[in-house]
Image: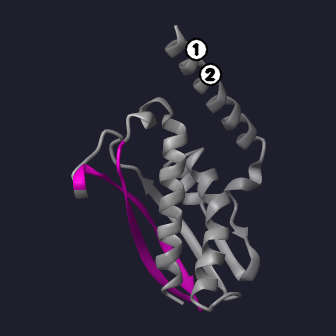
Amino acid sequence: MSISIMTRRATLASFAAALSLAALPGMARPRQAEGGVRVDVTPLLENSGNPTAAWVARLLPQAMAEALAGRGAAGASITVRVDYVMLGPSQGGVGPAGSSPDQMIGDVMVNGVSHPLRATSYYYPSAVDQGMIEQSNYYRVEQLVRVFAYWAAQET
């Protein structure tokens, strides 16, 4: 009985989140963060949909600003386009120690020069994650965003 309640709650929460994101049409538009970082998740919205695109749109500008500041390039003008977020199997995979590889694919434009970028992080499955799939996927996307921002900042 508790499993069906949790499933129903998760479904309702996902539906409510999707409705709230649909009410915000500006989420898929390119976002400008501090320091001239511009993030475009329009292709990701078409390829993966929400909530993945909304998570990336919210997390990537700050991660880019932090990564650029870490390289001493705070304030650099950079445009990032994210095309795909691919999460590997939740049960584990072929990565190190049975981990599952997650990837974010996009493009980084610095000073008018475009650089394709593919960032990879590894997810190590946990029994706890199986009951909280959406939260687990959020943490996986958050880790991918950090890795993507780190490599994008290397292009400056």
Asked whether 65 falls inside the magenta stretch, the response is no
Q: In terms of depth relative to the viewer, which is nearer, 136 or 154?
A: 136
Q: Badge 2: how crowded within 10 Å, few (<14), some, or many (20+)?
A: few
Residue at 31 percent across and 39 percent down: it is 91
Q: Main secondary structure of the magenta part?
A: strand
Residue 2 is left or right of residue 23, and the answer is left
- Magenta extent: 97-125
SS class, disc 2: helix
Asked whether 124 falls inside the magenta stretch, the response is yes
Which amino acid does the dot numbered 1 rest on? Answer: Ile
- Residue 152 in the image: x percent, y percent? 51, 78
Q: In terms of depth relative to the viewer, which is nearer, 93 or 77?
A: 93
Q: Which mark is residue 5?
A: 1
CA gap, disc 2 and disc 1: 6 Å
The coloring applied to the image is one colour
- Residue 35 in the image: x percent, y percent? 73, 82
Q: Quadrant of residue 89?
A: top left
Q: In terms of depth relative to the viewer, which is nearer, 50 or 90?
A: 90
Residue designated by label 2: 9
Residue at 75 percent across and 49 percent down: it is 25
SS class, disc 1: helix
Residues marked 2 and 1 touching at CB (< 8 Å) = yes
Which amino acid does the dot numbered 2 rest on? Answer: Arg
Residue 53 is left or right of residue 125, and the answer is right
Question: Number of callouts in the render?
Answer: 2
Residue at 72 percent across and 82 percent down: it is 36
- Residue 5 in the image: x percent, y percent? 58, 14
